[in-house]
Image: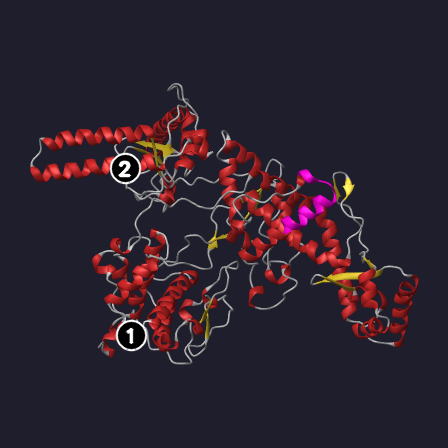
Amino acid sequence: MTSALAHEADPYILPTPTPDSSVVLSQWINPGNTHLNSRYRDAVWSLAPLIDNPGATLISIHWKNCPAPLRDEMKLVVWSLINGERRPTFLRTKGLSARGRGSASTMMQKYCEWFRLARWLHQQGITRLVDCTKDQWQAYAAERRDEGISRVHAEMVFGYFTDLWVYDQLSARPAGISCPPWESEGMDDYLPAADGTDNAENSTEPLAPQVLGPLLIWALRFVNDFADDILAAWAEQRRLMDVAASSIATPASRTTLKEYLLPLIDSGAPLPAAHVKGRLYLARDYVAAHTGATHAQIERLVKLHNIQNLVLERPAPCPLNVPVTGQIEGRPWREHIAFSEATTLMQQLGTAAAIVIVYLTGMRPQEVQALRSGCCPDPEPTTDGTEGRHLIRTYHFKNVLDDNGNHTSAGEIREVPWVAIAPVVRAIRVLERMVPEDELLLSAAHHDVHRPGGKQSQGAMRRASLNRRIEAFVTWVNREAEARGLLDQLIPEDPFGAIGMSRFRRTLAWHVARRPGGLAALAIQYGHMRTVLDTRTSSGYASRSRRGLHSVLDVETALAAADTAARFRDRTAAGEKISGPAARRAVTAAGQAPRFEGRLVPKTFAKKATAFLARDGIVLYDNPDAFLICAFKHDNALCEPEPGATAPRQYACTSGCGNTVRTDTHARQLRARADEIDQLADRAPGPIARKLQANAARLRETAATHDATTQTIEALT
């Protein structure tokens, strides 16, 4: 048993919490975080004190989901997960990407798997974590593996179970959880068989062109043409509702109410109506604002004259007294804006502005969610009197780490601001009119008018809410287009499923950049290119001579990459098939790459070569030693390239990499090389011969895998 002295000497051991202990210790809470902290005794633990990203969903742990006999022990381990740091000695065994502490979302993934294990143990009659021995680990791992999860997912899940053992050791009162057997035996035997489906490629599908076209047209139409009308209607609706809320019952107000409604009832005229949760009712706020009557006075009159049934028989819109200036196809888009639709139109306007920003900048959704009023100030005039560019300054969150290498939920200001084109600036200006100064542009408190207050109204609208609003926007647009006979402007259903915020960035990269001349099109359409940071310069050793050498290398590398793309085009045009996780991306890269018919290189080509190589993910590198083409994407590479590198470490090419591409020519070369190795094996001593034969067998197996997974270029485009 660990002694108290040992605990004091070990900075990683956590104290034993009491029922009144905070769930999140103060050292992990940023000063600006105002979320309430739970107590250890609570049945629900909030992880909100760890979440500073305004667009992130707030996470809670519900202890009812953990079996009661295992709950006390599991609470200690989860508390250690929330407040502990994994030891550096353990992290060194897990690679460069391992962190001492994870994000709240990563913690959620871990404790959910731990709860799942606890429920399984409970079903087996096990009520103590110490009784989860090697046999239980093996049985549960086999059951979890056979549920159909992928090899990559299984490896991640089993890593979470290792963390259950690791974090238990950080407690001053450990439960004695045993180390999972894969930590000593290796994980490979516990994982599902590799079937070629796991790779590091971005699986997010871009939006279909027939969807994106009309969607963007309508979003821009809202921002450019309808915004003034909608904002004026929203202000007028708010004013009328404030008037209605402040009404005081008087004999005069009752008289005015009767003079307003009774003539309509007696004459058979339509009555002012509003939809509430899908049903028609008398528009009480509208009537109250125009008569000064209270809701109680209106309700008595409704019951006395059976007005509700009359409203269903002859409803009338409640036009707001605001001008309509926007047009569709040269005609006013509305005769008037009704009182009951102002809220819906306001929400559609906010959604449209979000679509314009996320697509026409290429920002990640969480970056758009973090935008605040004032993020895109009007530029100062330049020295020559021309207007400067609009720059958007926002936070980014991906791979943002603190000084200890741990995830920083609050993110950090993006070093290079986005350059905003005119439609984006207009969309930002519209959102700035919808929220107070310095507020989040997509503030949940100001956009979700149906559910004000509550924890989900803090920060920005969540991505799931924005995704639902996009679908609602599509529904509204299609209903409007059908009513106006604009059938060519309908937004069809996307073949790959629901439209979501994350698909716009992928669409920018795919539907534009993949076409010949796509980079120039991006520069024109989006007003900015992805800024290429020269890591050699930022590393502080870019002297003139050094830079000159790198310029020469960039030119030669770019020419070689262009030749590789040309050969790839020629092979596929001749009917060769393609395999590999990056096959589709390679087709895109080959379509964009220029063909150099000679070696006459002007002095201006060096910068072009550097820019060409900086197109992460769409530059092809031939690797004849590995019998493949590398469609180099830095984040996918298993060759561990240096930060900022634009080319692979070809001598460290690793099988299973998500950048791999092969053609039928490579398969023939693999078999030819295998035959050569077999000839060498025939003349080599026994042990060496066996190694050579095994190598030849691996090459033939790789060629066979290519044959079994090939696709034509037509299938990939």
**Mark closest to the chain's N terminus, 2 or 1:** 1
Cα–Cα gap, marks 2 and 1: 47 Å
Please state if 154 lies on the left or on the right of 253 as rendered: left
Q: Are marks 2 and 1 in contact (CB under 8 Å)?
A: no
**Residue 702 - label:** 2
Q: In terms of depth relative to the viewer, which is nearer, 588 or 135?
A: 135
Tell me where the magenta segment starts and ends, as one range.
473-488
At horizontal 22% and vertical 30% (from top left) the residue drawn is 673
Indicate the quadrant containing the N terminus: top left, top right, bottom left or bottom right: bottom left
Q: Is residue 9 above or below residue 637?
A: below
Q: Is residue 624 above or below residue 168?
A: above
Q: Is residue 309 above or below residue 517?
A: below
Please state if 199 lies on the left or on the right of 417 as rendered: left
**Mark in front: 2 vs 1:** 2
- Find residue 108 and report its horizontal and vertical position in percent: 42, 64
Q: In terms of depth relative to the viewer, which is nearer, 333 or 209?
A: 209
Residue at the spot of label 1: 175
Type of amino acid under label 1:
Ala
